[in-house]
Amino acid sequence: MPHPMLSTLDPWLATAFWSALTIAFYLLAKRLYRRWPHWLLMPLALTPALLIVVVLLMHASYGDYMHGAGWLLTLLGPATVAFAVPIYEQRALIRREWPVLAFGMVAGSLTAIGTSWLLATLLGLNGALRLSLLPRSISTPFAMQVSQDIGGVPNLTAVFVVLTGVFGAVLGDMMLTWLPIRSSLARGAVLAIGAHGAGTARANQLGVEEGSIAGLLMVLVGLLNVLVATLLAALA
């Protein structure tokens, strides 16, 4: 049964409550992670966890939360458009390293989609669940669009993206520690292709070049996947 407080809230107050709570938890997580950079405190991981606790304590539903804070998802549109900025800023790098970038994009995308398909098969996932899992290795705005185009569930895809980002950033960091990877291009690519936004944030901590390359590759991989998914959806 929903919490009595929820049933008495005006829709505008509900929107203000869930929105303010989401933003406050994100700012708190960001501050904690800046002070103690542990993967459990990553805003991408801690913010949803705190929100889930509140939703459960209040006996609310996913629909209640989305009704109040769903407007935040509309910001993904402008965020996607803003991804054009790093592409423009790094146009010289694209012209100089386009063969390597193109190979990394294609290889990374095929590996991500292939491993997602294999994971879905091993777990016995079919239908919309399988399709929702496929775009897990690209950033949220692109992943949700791809999921919608191929028949998945965009909101479910967002969950898979968060999990991939958190664990991908942790594993990517371990790989850079264990493997003799010295090139800033390679280091940025490993984190961006393996962990999209979370990996890009980690790459920015490693250095300016790593962060720039990671941001660029994250965008290019996302655009590539959106294009391919759109073509596949049109041919289906």
Image: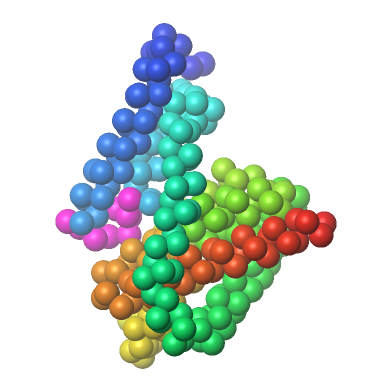
Q: Which image quarter: residue 187?
A: bottom left
Tell me residue 213's x, y (percent): 39, 75
Position of 54 relative to 147 (above/below): above
Nearer the observer, 236 or 107: 236
Q: Residue at x 35, y 24 (%)?
A: 16
Q: Residue at x 33, y 63 (%)?
A: 201
**Is any part of residue 132 visible from this angle?**
no
In this picture, residue 64 sits left or right of residue 86: right
Give the total number of marks visible in the rendering: 0
* Residue occupying the far right of the picture: 236
Q: Residue at x 51, y 69 (%)?
A: 220
In this picture, residue 156 sits left or right of residue 163: right
Tell me residue 8's x, y (percent): 41, 9
**Is any part of residue 180 visible from this angle?**
yes
Magenta span includes 36: yes
Q: Residue at x 34, y 83 (%)?
A: 184
* Residue occupying the far top of the picture: 8
* Residue occupying the far left of the picture: 35
The quarter in which the C terminus is drawn is bottom right
Position of 177 relative to 119 (above/below): below
Nearer the observer, 29 or 54: 29
Magenta span includes 234: no
Which coloring applies here? rainbow
Which stretch did the figure color magenta?
A: 35-43
Tell me residue 43's x, y (percent): 33, 50
